[in-house]
Image (cartoon, rainbow, N blue to C red):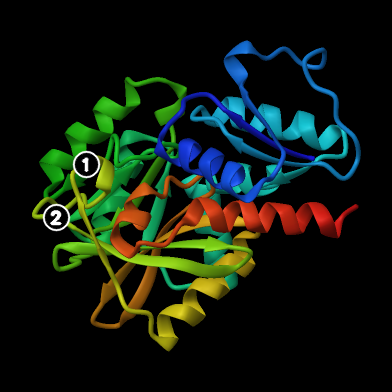
Amino acid sequence: MLHIFYSRLRIEEKTLFKAAESMGVNVDFRDVGDFVWPSDFSAVNGGVALCRLISQTQNIALTQLLESKGVRVINPSETVLLCGDKIATAAALDVAGVPQPDWRIAASPDSAVKAAESLGYPVVFKPAAGSWGRLLAKVDSRESCEAIAEHKAQMGPAHSIYYIQKYVEKSGFDIRAVMIGGKTVTLMKRCSEHWITNTARGGSPEPYPMDDELQNLLEWTASVIGGDFLAVDVFKTPEGYVINEVNGQPEFHGSMAATGIDVGRLMIEYAVKLCDSIK
């Protein structure tokens, strides 16, 4: 049995529903707003679930509950937890030797300024958790760095650890790969005159050609992060490609618009094969 849980019917969830319907796949498609655990769920070992909740906290909780009942979740909880923490992701990539922009971690406003100056301006302050390009700050000077660090110190426990990344000049675009089962299914670039190129912030999606260097890097990254369904953000630099972030709960409407590839159908096909393999 295939279960799909969602908290908002975005384009992605509608695409998954449409794909399952057109393929004749029986899916328990459920809004968690009407859901109480465990009375509203009957699971058996061998079931497969896609958790498409917008809230990271809700997504992790439901994933772990489903796994406790023997359900195989796309993505597993360890992948959801890893991708939901940019610091943990950076550390995992670092240990594996995967190239990424230089980065620092600090635990106070003073050490954040020290860390930024060790990287050299400009730098980017990022929240450890978050998506859609929110709460990013490009910092070009010590004065700005001191202000940003002090402001973050007042924003609560979630911002008490500073993740600072060396700014990468990316010529007006970054690259996003959507990966299913460790293989790239769509590849696009997101273009913008703004330094933040996320499509959620107005970036324009266009197809991007694959080459051997990029393919090897993406497959290497997927092997380090694990999971079934990832979006990997990449910068192209004069020295080669580097991994910026890995998203374990990807939106994919921009990738579909850029490439014409039905990611929803590919995801349902993958989930059905997974169901068949664990029966």
Q: CA distance from mark 1 to mark 2?
A: 9 Å
What quarter of the picture does the N terminus occupy?
Answer: top right
- Mark 1 belongs to which amino acid? Arg
Tag 2: Cα neighbours inside 10 Å, few (<14), some, or many (≥20)? some
Looking at the image, residue 45 lies above or below residue 174? above
Q: Nearer the viewer, residue 44 or 66?
A: 44
Tag 1: Cα neighbours inside 10 Å, few (<14), some, or many (≥20)? few
Q: Nearer the viewer, residue 156 or 13?
A: 13
Decide: marks 1, 2 in contact (CB < 8 A)? yes
Q: Which residue is mark 1?
A: 201
Circle number at residue 41: none
- Label tally: 2
Q: Earlier in the sequence, mark 1 or mark 2?
A: 2
Q: Which residue is mark 2?
A: 192
Q: Secondary structure at mark 1?
A: helix
- 122 on left or right of 274: left
